[in-house]
Every structure is written in structure tokens, then in C-alpha cells.
Amino acid sequence: MKGLFSTLALLLALAGPAEAQDTARSSDGLYTVAVVPNGKGDENGTGAQALVLYSTRGSAQRRLLVSKWNEDYSQNLAGLSKPLFSLDGGYVYFSSTDASPNSGYVHRFDLKLGVVKSICPGWALRVMRTGPYRGYLLVQTHRYWDRQEGGSYNPVFLTHPSGRRILMVPGSDNDDGELAIDPWLAKMKWRAW
């Protein structure tokens, strides 16, 4: 029974704060980063969320930013989600969005300089951990077919940390593009999380 409680305590510690909406852990296990509620905020989400860095070896925490809406979706920092550490742990990637499915954007927070940089449209899903693209991102976007019957799809792109797209993940050009990631990674013998 004591082992069960120890395991549960460890899992809770790794998960980060209980109220976190999205959480990620650094590769070295020393930190977690989480999107957490920050109060009511305004009608556009300004002030409603915060991106917070937590130490897993104590109670130290650092508020990286508080959500702030901007009508330029590449500069919008509201509707925060999907935080991910870069492979070296020096950056935190996260996504922002407002009501439109086309308005998602990936941003990078430099933990050393405390600066946010807009990277590319979409939502960062994973960071490549092995293979020739170690450190690159897998970014999902929402697109519309250029055909008479219309429609949309949600492809996933292998993306350089600068935001430059390298290739579309094969088979991701459909409504559930993220489902193509694991078979592609398995075929290539690469890992990403």
C-alpha cells in the first residue's frame, strides 16, 4: 500500500499544478510548464490565463507570461495551449488561438531572455526527439481545399524551430491529420513527444 501512495505522489508531482489546463515536463525532469487559469480576464481572454514554469525539486515557480489578446493572430497571446519544451530545455513552445480555426499560432518563449517570438501558424503538437530532425516541431494547421466542393483538412507539418515547413507528414491531409503522426514516426523509426 505504501508503494501505491508513493507512486501516486510522484505522478501528481510530475503532472504539475492541479488546476493546470495543459502541462509539459522538461527532458531533464527538473521543470514543468503549465497553462493555468489566471482569473476572469476580459471578453477576448486578456488576463484569463498564465504560462508558468515550475521546479519539480521544490516550490519555486516563474510566471512567464499572462494572456493578452491581439487582433493580429500572429501576435495574439490569448487562448493559450499545448506547452512544449525545446529539446535543450531553453525554450517553451506554446500555441494561442481565438475563435477561428485558422487563427492558431505557435510561439516560442526564450527562458533565458524572457522574450516571446511568433514562429508559425498552427498548433505545436510534439518536438522531434530522435532522427535527423531532432528538435524540430510537428505543427498542425487548419486549411481549406482549393476545389469547387470546398471543405477543410488539418495537415501536420514537420517544422524547423524558425517556423519553416520542411514536409507534410504523409497521410495527414485529412480532418484528423494528427492520427498520421504515430504510423509515420514508427515507419521512420523516429520518436517525438
Image (tube, helix red, strand yellow):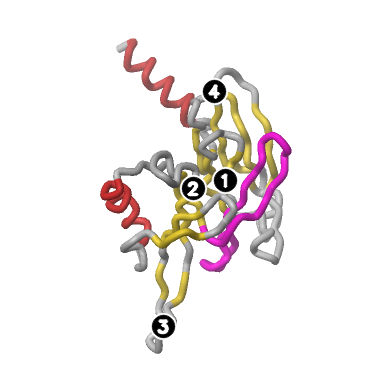
Q: How many marks?
A: 4
The mark nearer the N terminus, 2 or 1, is 1
Q: Which of marks 2 and 4 is in front?
A: 2
Distance in Å between CA atoms under marks 2 and 1: 11 Å
Locate the C terminus and report the quarter of the image it occupies: top left
Q: Is mark 1 on a helix, strand or loop?
A: strand
Query: Which residue matches tag 2?
Result: 136
Closer to the eye: label 3 or 2: 2
- Tell me what residue is drawn at x 34 percent, y 43 percent: 190
* Residue corresponding to mark 3: 150
Disc 3 packing (10 Å; few <14; some 14–19; many ≥20):
few
Disc 2 versus disc 4: distance between alpha carbons? 25 Å
In this image, 25 relative to 173: left or right? right
- The amino acid type, in three-letter code, at marker 3 is Gly
Which residue is at a point 37% across and 59% down the rendered structure image?
169
What amino acid is labelled 4 in the image? Thr
Identify the mark nearer the N-term, 3 or 1. 1
The stretch of residues the image draws in magenta is 96-122
Residue linked to disc 4: 56
Indicate which label's residue lies in the foreground, 3 or 1.
1
Q: Name the residue under label 1.
A: 93
Q: Which residue lies furthest to the bottom in this view?
A: 148
Disc 2 on helix, strand or loop? loop
Residue type at tag 1: Tyr
